[in-house]
Image (cartoon, grey):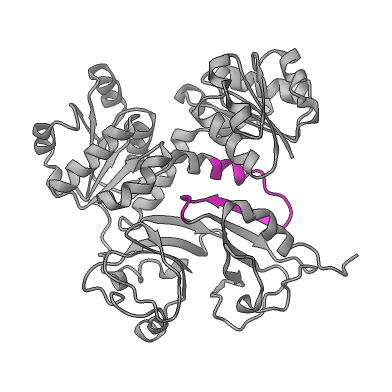
Amino acid sequence: MKVVICGAGEVGRFIAKYLSEEDHEVVLIDDESDALSDLDSRLDIQTLEGSALNPDVLKAAGTSDADMFISVTNHDEVNMLACLEAYSLFNVPLRMGRIRSGFFLDADKKKLQNELHMDVIISPEHEIAKSILSKLKITSALELIPLTNHKVCFLGLKCLEGAPFANIKLSEIAYVAPNLNLFIARIFRDGKSLTLSDDLRILPEDEVYFLIDYKQQRNVLELFGHEKDKAQKIVILGGGRVGYTLASMLEDNSLSKNIVLLEKNEQRAMEIAKTLSSTLVIKGDGLDEDILDEVDISTADVAMALSNEDEENILFSLLAKKKGAKKTFALINKAIYNQMISQLGIDVIVDPNAITISTILQHTQKGLVKVVYSLKTEIGELMEIEALETSKVIGTPCADIKVPKGVQICGFFRADTFYAPTSKEPIQAGDTVYVLTERKLTKEVEKLFSAGLFFF
C-alpha cells in the first residue's frame, strides 16, 4: 500500500515510521527542510519538501497512485483542504486529516466530512481523552479495550497482596474461579514479560493482561484484590486540549462528581473555567506541594498528568503518589520513558502515539482483519480477525494451530460466547478470532488466516 503523509511533526513522523515498518511505501511531505532532515536515511521512506496544498508537490509525491492520504500538519485548515485536493485532483481512495480546533469539531462533523471528502477526522487529543475515559470505567485497569461490540474485553490489572489470585499457579485459576471465562495473555514482573506456563505463579505486584467475557470484567476485580467502586475524586494536571477534553467528557458521562483541574497559565485557566460547568479549575503549578495540599491530593482516587511535558507529568505523578493519591496516570510521548516508568510506581502510561495509530488502523483494515489495536511495545498488537470459510484455521481448535514465535491466539467469539484457547471447540467460519502479535509479524498472521491452499 502506498501512503502519502503531509506534516513531519511528531505525529506525522511516528505514523511514517510505523507504516514503513509494516512494509508500506511511504512519502512524507513538509514545507520545512529541518523537519525532514535525515528522515529518509533513518527510515525506509521518501521525503519531499513543499506545501501540502501545492498540487505540483502532491503530484511529485505520486499522490495519484496512493492508496491512503494522511494530512497531519499543525494547521487544521491545511489538513482539510489537502484532503479535498487528494479527493478532487488525485482520487485517493482513503483520506484522513487531523483537526484539533474545537471550533471545527463542535460543528456539524458529519457534514464537514462529507463536504471536504474526509473519510476520517483524526483528533489525537479527543482520542486520548476517550481512551482515558474508558479506563476510568474500571479505575484499577492498566489497560481496557472493549472488543467485538463490547462482548469481549482486553483488560490489564495489577495483582495486589492478599488477593485470591496472588501466589497461585496459572493451572490453579480454574479451581479458584471455575466460572470465570478468561485467558491470560501477558504477565509483567518488574517491567519484564514472563514466559507463561502452567507452573508459573502470579505474584503480588505482577501486571496481568488477559481477555475476558465483557460481562465478567467487574467480577474479576476482587480476584486481583481491587475494589469495584468508581473514582469519586479525580485531579487533572494540565488544561490543554487533552486535559480540557477529558474534563468535559467526565462531566458529560457523570463518572465523577469531584473533578479538579490544575492549570498554571492564568489566561488558559480562566478560559476553561468559563466553559466547564462542575469542574473546579485552579490556577497553579502541579509541582508545587502547597497547591497539591490545597486540592487535598491525598484524597484523590485518580491523579492524571496530562500536560505537554513528559518530565512534568512524571514528576507530578510521583509526587501525587507520594502524597497518597490511589492511582496515577501519566501522558508520555517519549518511548524511552515508557521502558522505565513501571519501576517508578506510575500506574498507567497514556501513549498518544499508540492511540493515534490505533485510530488510523481501525479505518484501514479490509477483508479478514476487522480491527487492529496498537498496544505498548512490550505487549504488541491485538487483532480482531474474521475466520473465513476458506481459511486454513477452520475446523481446528486454537491450541492446535501452529503459529510463528511472537504470535499468540487468544481465543475467539461466537454467538455471544467467548472461547478461550484452552477450549477444544474448533474455529468455525464467521468466528471472530483474537490474536496478539509482535508488530513485525502482522503480515504472517494475515497469511495464517488467508484462503486455504486448495481454495483456488
**As drawn, 372 above or below 126:** below
Horizontal and vertical percent position of residue 334: 41, 37
Magenta span: 357-378
Tell me where residue 112 sits by quadrant: top right
Horizontal and vertical percent position of residue 144: 42, 56
**As drawn, 388 above or below 77:** below
**Which residue does the image show at 47% across and 62% down from the upper left?**
153
Tell me where residue 192 sits by quadrant: bottom left
Residue 365 in the magenta stretch? The answer is yes
Horizontal and vertical percent position of residue 242: 38, 33
The one nearer the camera, 61 or 429, is 61
Q: What is the total number of numbered labels drawn onto the structure image?
A: 0
**Which residue does the image show at 30% across and 69% down from the upper left?**
224
The one nearer the camera, 82 or 331, is 331
Outermost residue, bottom side? 175
Q: Is residue 369 left or right of residue 211?
A: right
Horizontal and vertical percent position of residue 251: 32, 40
**Which residue does the image show at 60% across and 22% down from the upper left?**
79
